[in-house]
Image (spheres, rainbow, N blue to C red):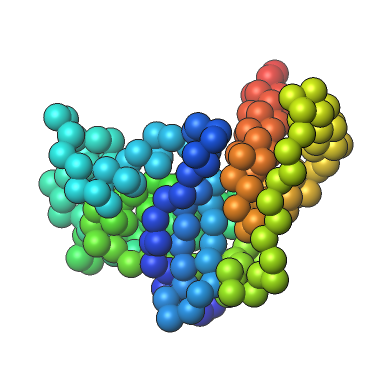
């Protein structure tokens, strides 16, 4: 069985200029190796509400799920963050009723939102750490974007979109990871939107008769 490594949730980072751009930051216990996972606003809100101990008028979806599991005597034992062949993050939920163990597929953001509510440990594998983690202490320098006119920015964005359109999903996933590693979450979110759009198109085609 492949060795598992414990991850700690450092928190959620966001782009102060571009709204709706969030990154979930997980760090390997005892090291400075980090895994950034780009997530949307609803998922970020669900995680932040628990981290900040914000009381909502009605239970959020993840709170309801934990309550439902408790009602049936099922416990979330742990979460395993994995990376699919196309580069997208996912997770396995390890559930137990005391006698049997169940493994349920999940989005990584939902898995983390459930784990912090159930006080369940979060793990990943060496393969994921090797392929998707970065160490901020290894950075030599940090580049700041240069100022430019609105037209130049628009032209630059158009060039970037055109470049991404020619990439495969695997290439897009690698580009998204590199953008997140350099804390360019705006570009990472833009790439994620392209991946999601392309995958939704593939699913629609597969459902056609």
Q: Residue furthest top?
A: 209
Can residue 85 be seen from the camera position used here? no
Query: Considering depth in this image, is 180 or 125 the residue closer to the camera?
Result: 180
* Image x and y of residue 128, in percent: 59, 66
Look at the image and tell me whether residue 99 can be seen. yes
Instruction: Give x and y (percent) for residue 185.
Output: 59, 45
Report how many numbered discs are placed on residues in the image. Answer: 0
Residue at horizontal 70%, vertical 18%? Answer: 209
- Which of the two residues, 198 or 10, is positioned nearer the viewer here? 10
- Left or right, residue 157 beside residue 13: right
Give the residue drawn at x 65%, y 23%. Answer: 204
- Is 187 situated left or right of 57 in this image? right
- The residue sitting at 63% across, 48% down in the picture is 184
**In front of the other: 10 or 165:** 10
The x and y percentages for residue 58 are 16, 30
**Percent of width and height locating residue 131:** 66, 66
Please determine whether, in this image, residue 124 is positioned above or below residue 170: below
Residue 119 in the image: above or below residue 188: below
Residue drawn at point x = 74 percent, y = 44 percent: 146
């Amino acid at each position: 069985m492949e060795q598992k490594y414990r991850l700690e949730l450092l928190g959620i980072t966001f782009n102060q200029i571009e709204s709706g751009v969030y990154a979930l930051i997980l760090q390997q216990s005892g090291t400075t190796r980090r895994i950034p996972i780009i997530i949307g606003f609803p998922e970020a809100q669900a995680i932040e509400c628990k981290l900040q101990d914000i009381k909502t008028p009605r239970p959020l979806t993840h709170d309801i799920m934990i309550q439902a599991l408790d009602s049936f005597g099922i416990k979330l034992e742990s979460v395993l963050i994995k990376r699919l062949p196309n580069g997208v993050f996912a997770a396995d939920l390890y559930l137990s009723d005391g006698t049997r163990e169940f493994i349920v597929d999940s989005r990584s953001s939902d898995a983390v939102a459930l784990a912090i509510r159930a006080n369940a440990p979060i793990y990943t594998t060496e393969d994921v750490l090797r392929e998707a983690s970065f160490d901020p202490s290894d950075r030599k320098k940090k580049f700041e974007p240069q100022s430019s006119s609105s037209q130049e920015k628009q032209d630059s964005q158009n060039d970037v979109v055109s470049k991404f359109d020619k990439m495969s999903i695997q290439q897009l996933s690698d580009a998204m990871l590199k953008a997140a590693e350099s804390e360019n979450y705006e570009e990472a979110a833009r790439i994620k939107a392209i991946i999601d759009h392309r995958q939704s198109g593939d699913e629609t085609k597969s459902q056609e008769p």
